[in-house]
Structure formats: C-alpha cells, structure tokens
C-alpha cells in the first residue's frame, strides 16, 4: 500500500506527541512558510497543488484563499470540524491520531491569508478531541510554533477550539459562523461569501479538517509532488469512510480516482454475509443512490467521475447497501435524519422534510399506495432548487433517486389493494 | 449621499429604471407588480428565508472575449435564465435583467412554497384577528390549492395563547417563522428581547426579558407580522378588521407627532356607541416612518375612561353640581367680563393650535393674560432657530452632527430616539450630553457627562473653547471646557449639518431657558441656522408645546405669585394643584376659577366651574411638533356631552361679545393671518400627501404590514423668520447644597402616572409606583437599602416614597421621576430620612 499522507499515525506510533511529530517532517512547513515564504507564495503553492476542499464541495482550496478581502481587517480562519454527515468519520481519526499535522495546516492557512486568529469549530460530541487539541495547541505555543512573534518575525497566530451544541446544520459553513458568534446556528444568505463577510462580519476562510491536514505536506514536499497522487483534476489523497454492508468498514486513505470496486471489494473485503451489492451512497445521507452496476463499481471516485453516475463524491463517506436492504426503509432513515436536523429557517426544508417523513414512514410500513410514492416524489421535487442552503437540497437526493432508480422496491412494499 | 447609477430591466414585461442595488421585489413594487413576501420587509435587509418571492431571473449573455452582450438573430439581447428560481427579495437588479413572475415555473414555485407553509398553518382565519387583513390569507385565496395533500390528522398543535409579555400574545400555530419580529426587535428597536429557539418545525419565538417582551416598540411587531401570530392584548378577539372605520389622527403623548390611524367600531356591548378598538401607525416618513411607540399605541384608553367628566359642573353651596351648557357658559362669560384684565388663562401644550388661539383671543379680548403651563422653556428660540423647512431625520447621515443635551430620548420621545439611532447608524456623528447614562449612548461617537445643573454651562464651554482659536464671541463667566468638550466643539464646528435636541432632564423652567439659549448660541456661532437639516429641536413634555409658543403663550416665571395676583383663572388642560400641592391653596383662594379638562383633576376639585372637554380622538384640530411640523387630526369618536376646547372658548367669547370663530378651519385661517410663522398655511395644504417609500398600501399583500398608508396629510413645517436673533448670554442658575443634603432632580419616564397614561390599565405592569432613586454609595452612607420607605420635605410638604438604589444615578443626586406622585418642578436640595417604624 502507498504511503499515508494524512493517516500517518497508522505507521508512526506516537505521532500525536509533538516530539514524535517533529521527528517525522512535523512543523517544518510552518516554519518554512513563516520564515521564508510570502503569504501569497503559500497560497500559490496550494493553488498549484490542485488541492480541492474535502468537506464535500471540492472547491479549489488555493483559489478560495486568494478570495480573501484584503481591504477589510482583521481576517479569520475557521476549521470546520463539525463532521456530522452520517457515514463520515475521517476528521475524527485525523484529529485523534495526527492532530499536529492538522493544527499545522490551520496555522499555515492563517499565515497565508494574514489571519492572527483561527477557530476550530468542533461538534459538541467531540469534546474529548477538543481537550486534546487544546493540549496540542498549548504544546505548540510552548515550543514557539504558535503565539506572538513566531520564529522572531512579527507574525502572530493563535488557535482556539470551539464546541458546537450538536446540530447538523452547523456543518454548513455560514450556519457554523453564526453558531461561532454565539447565535442560533442557521445558514446565512449568500452572497456575500465568507472570504468577504465571515465570522464577526470579517473576511474568513473556512476549510475542512482533512483539507487543512494536506497543507503541511504540500508546503514540505511541493505542489509537483502532490500532483503525482490522484487524478489530474482531483489530485491528492482522500480518506474514504467506508461503512454499511461491507466486511471491513473503516477509513481508507487512497488516491482520488480509486474505483468503488477497489474500495469496497479489495479494501472493504466485499459484502457482508455473501449478499449482493445493490446500491452505493457516496456522500453519506446526502447522496443519491447509485445503482451498483459493474459500470458504477468501475467508476473512479473523483470529483469529475461520480457526477456521471448522477451522484456526488461529497465528503466520500461511502455507504454500501446490499440486496437485503429495502430502499423504502433506507430513505425513511435518511428522511428522519433530515427532518430532525432541519434548522427551520427556510420553508421548503422545514415543512418539506416533515411532510416527507410522514410519507416515508407510511411507505416503509408497507401500508401506502403507489399514489403516496408519487406524492413523495412530488414533494421532494417541490423542495428541489428552493432551499436557502445546500443541506435542504441534500434531503431529497435519496428519496428522488430511490424512487426513480429502485421502483421495484416501492412496488413490492406498497399496499396492492390501495393501488 | 452618493448618486447611484440607474439600471433598466423588465419585470413581467414592464420596463422599469431604478438605482443600482435596488432589490427586484422593490423595483416590482414601484411599477405595481406585487411579488409576495413574508420574511422580507422593506424597512429591513433581506434574509431570504421564506422563499415565497421566487421568480425566474434572466440576464443578458455577455461574450467573454469582447465583453459585449450577445444578440439574438432579431437583434434583441440574448437572455440566459437560471436553472433555479431566485428570491426576488434578496437579488439586486442588474442592467438588462428580465424578471418573470408569471411564467408557469414561477407560479408553480410560488404555489409550492405556499402549500408548504399551509401544511403547518392552522387556517383558522374565521377566528383569527388578522383574518381580513392577512397577506397569507389573501395569497391563499389567490394561489392556494383547493384541497390539501397533507392528509394527516395531526397538523401542528401548539400553544394558541402564548404570552410574550402581558402586551403581546403569540399564537404558535399561526407563526410561519418569517423572523420579521425578531429582526425588528434586534435591528430596528435594538431591544433584542425575543428570539428563535429550537429548530426545524419546532422553531419558535420566545421572549427572554423580564417583564416579557420588554420594549417600548413591541406593538410594531404585530403590524409587520404577516400572519395572525402576534396580536396585542388590546385588540385580541376584540373586532374583525372589516368592521372597523378608520380616522386619521396625531399622537397626543409627546412632541414627535406620530401619525396615527384610529380604528373605530360601533358596537352593541358599548351601548351602541362608537368606540376605539385599536391605534395603528399611519405612514409619515418624515415623522414616524411606519412605527409608533407602545405609549402611543396602548395609551389612548384615557379617552374612553369611565372617569371622564360628562357634564359641566358648578359650585353651589360648596359642592360641584351638574349644570347645563348654556347656563354655565353665560355664568363663566359674565365672570370673565367682570374680571377683565384680572383674568389669567393658564393652558398647556396638550391643547391644539386652534384651542390655544381661541384662548388667547378671548383672553386678550378681555384684556387679561394668557400663559403657558410648563416647566420647560425655549420655544421662542425654537421659533427663530428651529429646524429648517424640509428637515427630515431620515436624511441625516455622514456629515451631520446630532447633539442631544439633557434628554433621555428613549423615555421622552421614543420615536425620535429610534430615528436618531438610525441616523447614527447611517454615519451621522452623535454626541450625547447628559448627567447619567441613557440608552442613546450606545450609538454615540462621543459622550459628555456633566453634573446636574451644568447643562447650559457645558454648552457655553463648547462655545468658549471655539472662541480660543477663532474669532468667536465668548460667554462671560464660563470656564473653557476640558478635552472632551473641546473635541465635541471641534466636531460641531466642522459639521456640515447640526441638529441640537434639548430636553428637560433634571431641570426646571429657569435652567431650561438658559439651556435653550446656550444651544441657540451654539447653533448661531457655528452658523448652523436657517438651513435644512439644521436647527434646534425641543423635547417638549407635551404634543403641542411648540404650537403654544408660536401662538404667543409664555410660561410664568413665578406661577404661585401669578396665581395670587389674578381674580379669575381659566385653567385648560392643566392640573397645577395635582402637579404641585403647594399651589392648591392659592387656587382655592382665587376669586373665580374655571377648569376645562377631561377629568376631575385636583385643580378641578377646587374650581368654581368645571367644563368637560373633548379628547383629541373626538374632534379635529392641529398640533405643531417639536420639528415645527403642523399636522391635522380628525374626529373619530363623536360625543356630544362634551365640547372641543376651541368651541367652549368660542361659546364664552360669543357671550362676552367677542368675535371668536368656532369652526376649526376658520380658526386656523385667523391664526394664519395673525401668527407670522403660520403664514401661507391652510387646512387643505395640511391634508395633502405625496407618494412615500416604502409603498405600504393595505392592498392584497400588505407590503410593509397592516399599518395605514397616509391619505390624510403629511403636514407642513413652519418657516423660519428671516432675521437671526442676536446673541444673548444666559444667566446660569445655581443650586447650592448644604451638608447632608442631596440634590433632587426631576426626570421624565415614558410610562408615568399622569392622567393620560394611568387609565390605560393594560400598561399597569409597566408603570412604576412613586419612588426616588439614589446611587448605592449615597444609600449606604444613609444606611438605606433598595425598597426602604423614606421621607423628605419639599416646599413644606412631607413626601413619603420608596427608595430605589441604582448605580446609574450620579453620586449626590436623588432622581425623582416626573408625574409619579412626587411633585418636583426644578432641582431642589432635600434631606432624606427613613420613616421611623411605628
């Protein structure tokens, strides 16, 4: 297996200790950036690496950094560690096993966008991780890697952790910024985008934990090296969180462009109990259901290829569905989740998810008619394209694709006498 | 203000040209296209939450290489429509944009959002107070599905009567979570006392203040609530909107002159009488925009109080007994004629211009003297140096300095507070000068604290600071100010515009005159006179004090002495004996006393004749605001048992063989002919309107809320005389304390126990009881704690009240709220003692 770039702790015991980390390429990049590189050069290096945001949208990271409004001060960096997508558990492993590489990435980002303060917004359940990060930040300060006058320059960088109170919506970046400000976590109207108006109405760069963890290695080894991993348009390694009906679920760090088949069949050791694979959800509960044909299994997992299957790579939380799973049951689960997590700010998501939940419950119970399946499709279509934020739009991916691509499952559960 | 580029676009095929940055929804409103909105409100920034305003938006395709628009074969612009519908409330217009709200896609989008809203809405329109003036109801009638596809027995069931406070109730089922109320409270009123809590379909509004919904502006949220979720305790289940008649009025509580709409109904349970059901704001963007304070909204009940005087009374054998109008008027006329130059008329600014003019005509016709009943002075200076014609607080921003001296605007004139705050937010420089903290300081660029009594000398010190380096006149006997005063003076002198608000915080008549003169001098030496958006604004205690000054009424320097000098007293809309018990004996001993009022006041109890007057809701007339805007109000409730003040006075005059008019517009014409500053104004001009933005018509979708548009007059500002007065330096009065004494100072609070407030029973929780307030240090020194009963002597009268301890009270001072049971007309040294037990 190729060398780990992000999950390096798997091969290096004790990487969560600052000394071990320093002995293993640690904190060189931060010093190099602050003492020998112009902030714009750092941004350009990240741009040249082709690194794309790992939170789900796949937006080019260096380009985002270059959007920061230089006429408005101060600037902030916020690391999105709210990891809440069902089926996603990659950021947690990074922060537990390789925290310094993540924190170093945050600090380099702060340097690149001329921010003195960076916040790490963690979901409330991550309080032990927050405590650990606080200790790591203290160690870095003690060793002179954070604080004022870094490496005898005039640069100050301080990191702060902040715990959320447990809401899926706070993973949406603008809702996260409101939550960070102490407000009820609800998404903001965009534009303006955070690089122009972010936390405390100041320019802010928001990046996912995994994205930032790539940065030290890019600065250390250079963009050219980084581009040798992955595909041309989706370079670099990606952590795939594999779960569902597989023999060996877990996090797998693989180059972008690895096929579903390799992930599921080789790394995941195939389907549980000898069942047949039926569907794949590539982006957690926010996914459309991919019909697990040979063609789909042979598709490379990158930001360009997955959309050709009518789905998105998202945060690459791959949930495997086998032929023992009823699709109506599955979408009932995802809709329960979205109904529970809808923030309620915009009408279609607040009311639509509630309505869909009634429908999916009835359908999953086997007592519904095909007319109700059609109504579910109507309601989902009616939500589409009308929500304030992307999370509302995600809620309809599973029901729409489920009904369209797995119609037989619905025919078998609906009450024939009502049809 | 920067001139913005104009942008041309079409909306539903109609062309429109608007300034860059205009939102689609507002551009549409300008050409009469109604795009439905719930969360958007034209007075607030968009949030794009409700998604009701979805439209199709097309933009010209631009050739990337050349930067030119791509053309269709027929030469027209090639338009690219977005894949998704866009929210018209949050999308600014752009050149060549094509907005379509009538296409199948846009209409479907609108219907679909509406269907979602209705899945959680109880549709209890038949019992909803908003029914009949509800945008959601009207939109449902227009677009709503005839049948529900949400077929579940349990719709949303939530609290139907959830008190956010004792004034505003929330129906949680009806709430559509648009957040207008929450945003109004935090962004406009800056009382963020209500919020959303929870999430998803459980998202709810709650209040987190004590008392609940603690804001002077809370009632406005019920106007802008687009459904029947927020209702006032006043109107809840009281009437249906379609049963109401509306009359235009002007608020009589303070000098702002907020435009009101009075909703009336004739009803069986009021014995077939027409009664007021609610007070609503009426739009006047130059005065109150579309807002009113809760005192204006809930403080009208005194006009319908059971304790109103209903018939004339005359004293017979020591008792006040009923008498007919004809008889009483001739009795009064005889006595006034006999008194002749020994007649003193004492009237307050609660009366209209017409009332005051007639009083003045009668009194001068008989050779007597008219005087204004007030503890605040300076109206003569305002006549000369008031704000220039065309002044609008909404226009103030960068380049303007607003100086507020000796006034807690939030308590004295809440809507001015709101508008000054907004001006500061737009970039105006606000300087707040007051002896203690006031809420306005939050928006101030500079705060200057002075000791009670030093208000005039603080302003004069600013002038003297300027005189140091420029060739300015200098106030005698006044020291130069320190750094703070110097910096304020410099800001003021370099300001493009200067508005000075002066009030009556901690001062009486004499000090008020000095303060007004000092402020007038500051305006004159810095040359901020006779210009639009410049001048002096008095924060009068009453609605028409300025009108009284314009007409020639002046306060008496020594009221007690004056009352003793005259044989006959004609006291209208004033209660000197109630306000100052030491005056009671003087009035009791006067030869012939006529009191004209709404209630049997302490003064009326001492009178020989009591004449019941109509309230402002029952008659017509005009008030002159502190900004010198003359505004008309119209009769609503008709009550024949009492008469309007002007008519009573005209009746007496007629019997005294004087030519005094009895019809308001004719009185006004005489007034116009006699009082130079009113020249050229008549009733018809006062009733004229021009188009205002935002357009708030009560049409189908209630853009802006259920408040009323203005069809009955925006008023006219008085012009200023061409002469600028010469500089006069005021004598600054001093008060000297002996050892062990505290300085008791009068201050104004919004909800007091005055006779026009206390009958509004629904405000009872907000009206404090009689008290005085001390700093904790003084209280500790006197060994007193919060809530103790204390006593002190004022003008020979012993006062017993509760003590409040408050760290915002300056040391050495006892704060005495006006009209709260302790009579204090000017700063006075007192010695506070505990009440001995037993």
Image: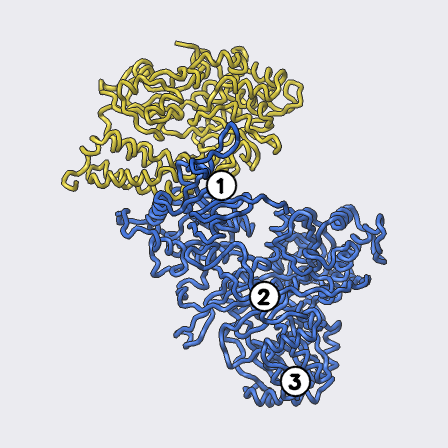
Label 2 SS: loop
- Pointer 1 indicates a residue of which chain? B
Q: Furthest-front residue in view?
A: B74
Q: Residues within 10 Å of mark 1 (few under 14, many from 20)?
A: some
Q: Are marks 1 and 2 on the same chain?
A: yes
Please report whichever mark, 3 or 2, sits nearer to the chain's N-terminal start: 2
Q: Label 3, on which residue? A: B659
Image hue for chain B: blue
Q: A317 left or right of A104?
A: left
Chain name for mark 2: B
Q: CA distance from mark 1 to mark 3?
A: 67 Å
CB-based contact (under 8 Å), mark 1 and mark 2: no
Q: Nearer the viewer, mark 3 or mark 2?
A: 3
The Cα–Cα distance between marks 3 and 2, rounded to whole angstroms, is 32 Å
First in sequence, mark 1 or 2: give its number.
1
Q: Which chain can be seen in yellow?
A: A
Residue behind mark 2: B253
Residue A325 percent across, percent down from the top left: 24, 27
The residue singled out by tag 1 in the image is B96
> Of discs 1 and 3, which sits in the foreground?
1
Q: Position of residue A6 (x, y in %)?
A: 45, 17
Q: Give x and y (percent) for residue B406.
A: 70, 58
Secondary structure, mark 1, is loop
Query: Residue at coordinates 56% horizontally, 32% vertically from top-left?
Result: A203
Answer whether residue B170 is visible to the viewer in this image.
no
């Amino acid at each position: 297996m190729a060398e780990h770039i992000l999950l390096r702790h798997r091969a290096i015991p004790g990487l969560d200790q600052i000394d071990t980390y320093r002995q293993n390429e640690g904190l060189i990049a931060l010093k190099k950036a602050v003492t020998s590189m112009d902030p714009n050069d750092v941004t350009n290096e990240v741009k040249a690496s082709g690194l794309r945001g790992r939170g789900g949208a796949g937006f080019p990271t260096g380009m985002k950094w270059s959007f920061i409004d230089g006429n408005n001060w101060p600037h902030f960096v916020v690391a999105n560690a709210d990891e809440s997508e069902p089926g996603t558990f990659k950021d947690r492993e990074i922060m537990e096993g390789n925290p310094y590489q993540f924190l170093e990435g945050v600090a380099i980002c702060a340097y690149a966008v001329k921010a003195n303060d960076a916040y790490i917004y963690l979901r409330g359940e991550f309080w032990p991780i927050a405590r650990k990060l606080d200790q790591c930040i203290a160690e870095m300060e003690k060793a002179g890697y954070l604080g004022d006058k870094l490496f005898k320059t005039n640069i100050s960088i301080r990191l702060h952790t902040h715990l959320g109170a447990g809401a899926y919506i706070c993973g949406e970046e603008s809702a996260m910024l409101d939550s960070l400000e102490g407000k009820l976590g609800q998404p903001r109207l965009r534009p303006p985008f955070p690089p122009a108006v972010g936390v405390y109405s100041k320019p802010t760069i928001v990046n996912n934990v995994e994205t930032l963890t790539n940065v030290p290695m890019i600065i250390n080894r250079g963009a050219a090296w980084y581009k040798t991993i992955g595909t041309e348009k989706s370079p670099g390694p990606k952590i795939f969180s594999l779960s569902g009906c597989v023999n060996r679920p877990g996090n797998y760090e693989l180059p972008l462009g690895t096929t579903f088949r390799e992930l599921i069949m080789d790394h995941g050791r195939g389907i549980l109990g000898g069942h047949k694979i039926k569907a794949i959800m590539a982006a957690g509960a926010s996914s459309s259901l991919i019909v697990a044909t040979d063609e789909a299994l042979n598709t490379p997992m990158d930001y360009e290829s997955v959309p050709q299957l009518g789905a998105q790579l998202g945060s690459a939380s791959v949930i495997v569905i086998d032929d023992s799973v009823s699709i109506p049951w599955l979408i009932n689960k995802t809709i329960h989740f979205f109904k529970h997590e809808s923030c309620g700010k915009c009408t279609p998501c607040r009311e639509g998810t509630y309505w869909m939940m009634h429908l999916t419950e009835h359908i999953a119970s086997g007592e519904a008619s095909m007319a109700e399946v059609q109504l579910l499709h109507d309601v989902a279509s009616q939500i589409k394209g009308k929500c304030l934020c992307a999370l509302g739009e995600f809620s309809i991916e599973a029901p729409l694709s489920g009904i369209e691509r797995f119609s037989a499952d619905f025919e078998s559960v609906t009450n024939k006498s009502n049809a | 203000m920067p001139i913005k580029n104009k942008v041309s676009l079409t909306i539903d095929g109609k062309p429109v040209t608007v300034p860059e940055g205009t939102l689609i929804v507002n551009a549409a409103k300008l050409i009469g296209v109604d795009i439905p909105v719930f969360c958007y409100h034209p007075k607030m920034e968009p949030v794009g939450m409700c998604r009701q305003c979805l439209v199709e938006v097309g933009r010209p395709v631009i050739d990337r290489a050349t930067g030119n628009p791509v053309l269709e074969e027929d030469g027209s612009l090639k338009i690219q429509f977005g894949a998704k519908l866009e929210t018209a409330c949050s999308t600014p217009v752009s050149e060549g944009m094509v907005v379509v709200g009538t296409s199948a896609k846009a209409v479907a989008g609108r219907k679909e959002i509406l269907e979602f809203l209705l899945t959680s809405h109880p549709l209890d329109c038949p019992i909803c107070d908003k029914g009949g003036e509800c945008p959601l109801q009207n939109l449902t009638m227009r677009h709503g599905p005839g049948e529900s596809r949400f077929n579940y027995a349990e719709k949303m069931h939530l609290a139907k009567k959830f008190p956010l406070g004792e004034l505003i109730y929330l129906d949680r089922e009806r709430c559509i979570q648009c957040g207008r109320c929450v945003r109004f409270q935090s962004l406009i009123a800056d009382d963020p006392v209500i919020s959303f809590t929870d999430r998803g379909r459980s998202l709810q509004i709650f209040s987190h203040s004590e008392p609940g919904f603690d804001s002077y502006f809370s009632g406005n949220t019920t106007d802008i609530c687009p459904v029947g979720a927020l209702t006032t305790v006043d109107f809840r289940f009281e009437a249906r909107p379609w049963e109401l008649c509306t009359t235009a009025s002007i608020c009589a509580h303070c000098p702002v002159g907020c435009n009101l709409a009075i909703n009336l109904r004739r009803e069986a349970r009021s014995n077939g009488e027409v009664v007021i059901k609610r007070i609503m704001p009426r739009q006047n963007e130059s005065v109150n925009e579309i807002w009113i304070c809760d005192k204006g909204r809930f403080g009208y009940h005194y006009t319908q109080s059971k304790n109103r005087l209903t018939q004339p009374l005359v004293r017979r054998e020591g008792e006040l007994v009923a008498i007919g109008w004809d008889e009483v008027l001739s009795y009064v006329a005889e006595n006034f004629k006999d008194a002749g130059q020994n007649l003193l008329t004492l009237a307050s600014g609660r009366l209209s211009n017409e009332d005051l003019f007639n009083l003045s005509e009668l009194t001068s016709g008989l050779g007597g003297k008219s005087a204004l009943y007030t503890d605040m002075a300076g109206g003569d200076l305002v006549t000369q140096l008031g704000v220039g014609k065309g002044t609008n607080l909404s226009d103030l921003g960068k380049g303007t300095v607003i100086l507020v001296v000796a006034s807690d605007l939030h308590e004295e004139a809440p809507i001015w507070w709101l508008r000054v705050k907004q001006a500061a937010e737009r970039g105006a420089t606000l300087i707040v000068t007051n002896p203690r903290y006031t809420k306005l300081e939050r928006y101030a660029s500079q705060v200057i604290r002075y000791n009670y009594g030093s208000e005039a000398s603080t302003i004069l010190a600013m002038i003297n600071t300027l005189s140091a380096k420029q060739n300015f006149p200098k106030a005698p006997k006044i020291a130069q100010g320190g750094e703070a005063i110097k910096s304020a003076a410099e800001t003021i002198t370099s300001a493009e515009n200067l508005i000075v608000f002066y009030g009556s915080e901690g001062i009486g008549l004499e000090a008020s005159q000095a303060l007004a003169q000092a402020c007038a001098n500051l305006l004159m030496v810095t040359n901020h006179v006779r210009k639009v958006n410049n001048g002096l604004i008095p924060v009068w205690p009453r609605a028409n004090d300025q009108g009284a000054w314009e007409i020639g009424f002046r306060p008496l320097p020594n009221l007690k002495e004056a009352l003793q000098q005259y044989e006959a007293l004609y006291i209208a809309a004033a209660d000197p004996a109630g306000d100052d018990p030491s005056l009671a004996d003087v009035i009791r001993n006067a030869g012939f006393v006529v009191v004209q009022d709404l209630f049997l006041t302490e003064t009326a109890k001492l009178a020989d004749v009591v004449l019941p007057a109509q309230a402002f809701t029952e008659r017509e007339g005009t008030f002159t605001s502190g900004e010198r805007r003359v505004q008309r109000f119209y009769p609503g409730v008709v009550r024949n048992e009492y008469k309007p003040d002007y008519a009573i006075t005209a009746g007496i005059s007629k019997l005294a063989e004087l030519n005094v008019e009895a019809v308001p517009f004719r009185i006004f014409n005489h007034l116009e002919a006699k009082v130079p500053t009113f020249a050229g104004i008549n009733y018809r001009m006062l009733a004229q309107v021009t188009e205002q933005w935002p357009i708030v018509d009560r049409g189908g979708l209630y853009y802006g809320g259920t408040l009323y548009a203005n069809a009955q007059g925006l008023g006219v500002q008085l012009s200023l005389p061409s002469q600028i007065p010469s500089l006069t330096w005021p004598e600054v009065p001093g008060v000297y304390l002996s050892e062990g004494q505290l300085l008791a100072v009068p201050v104004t609070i919004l909800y007091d126990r005055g006779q026009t407030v206390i009958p509004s029973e629904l405000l009872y929780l907000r009206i404090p009881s009689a008290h005085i307030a001390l700093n904790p240090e003084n209280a500790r020194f006197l060994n007193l704690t919060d809530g103790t009963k204390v006593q002190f002597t004022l003008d020979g009268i012993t006062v017993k009240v509760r003590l409040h301890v408050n760290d915002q009270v300056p040391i050495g001072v006892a704060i005495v709220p006006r009209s709260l049971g302790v009579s204090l007309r000017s700063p006075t040294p007192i010695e506070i003692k505990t009440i001995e037990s037993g």
